[in-house]
């Protein structure tokens, strides 16, 4: 019996388990040290782990950029109303040019 045959048998068995049986099998596997290390993390566990880790994005930006970002002055609702601000600025430039 080859590993490929084992994998095929396992896939076939998993396809025929009920959701409750699949959860129970995952619990059994997660309690076995050797098998638990081989299991990939679930996407929701990866997100929880990413949320728990400190955010290092600031380390990727140069200090000069961070200083610039902190010096920008704009109304508190600028992000929400940026279209209106851009439109008004375009109208101001258009009337100044004509």
Image (spheres, rainbow, N blue to C red):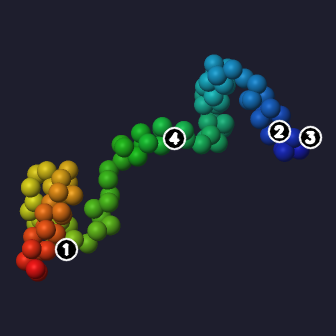
Mark 2: which secondary structure? helix
Q: Which residue is mark 4?
A: 43
Q: Which mark is residue 37?
A: none
Relative placement, left or right, of 20 versus 80 is: right
Which numbered disc, 1 or 2, marks the residue that appears first in the sequence?
2
Which numbered disc, 3 or 2, marks the residue that appears first in the sequence?
3
Q: CA distance from mark 3 to mark 2?
A: 11 Å
Q: CA distance from mark 1 to mark 3?
A: 62 Å
Residue 13's image quarter? top right
Mark 3: which secondary structure? loop
Q: Residue at x 64, y 22 (%)?
A: 19
Residue at the right extreme, as displayed = 1
Q: CA distance from mark 2 to mark 4?
A: 24 Å
Mark 4: which secondary structure? helix
Q: CA distance from mark 1 to mark 4?
A: 36 Å
Relative placement, left or right, of 60 versus 45 is: left
Q: Residue at x 21, y 58 (%)?
A: 83
Q: Which residue is mark 2?
A: 8
Mark 1: which secondary structure? helix
Query: Between residues 98 and 91, which one lies in front from this camera angle?
Result: 98
Contact, mark 3 vs mark 2 (Cβ under 8 Å): no
Query: Between residues 74 and 36, which one lies in front from this camera angle?
Result: 74
Where does the C terminus fall, quadrant-wise? bottom left
């Amino acid at each position: 019996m080859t590993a490929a045959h084992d994998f095929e048998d396992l896939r076939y068995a998993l396809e025929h388990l009920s959701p409750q049986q699949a959860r129970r099998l995952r619990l059994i596997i997660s309690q076995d040290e050797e098998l638990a290390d081989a299991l990939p993390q679930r996407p929701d566990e990866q997100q929880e782990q990413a949320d728990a880790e400190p955010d290092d994005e600031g380390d990727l930006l140069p200090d000069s950029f961070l200083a610039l970002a902190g010096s920008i002055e704009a109304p508190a609702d600028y992000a929400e109303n940026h279209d209106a601000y851009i439109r008004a600025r375009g109208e101001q430039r258009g009337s100044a040019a004509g």
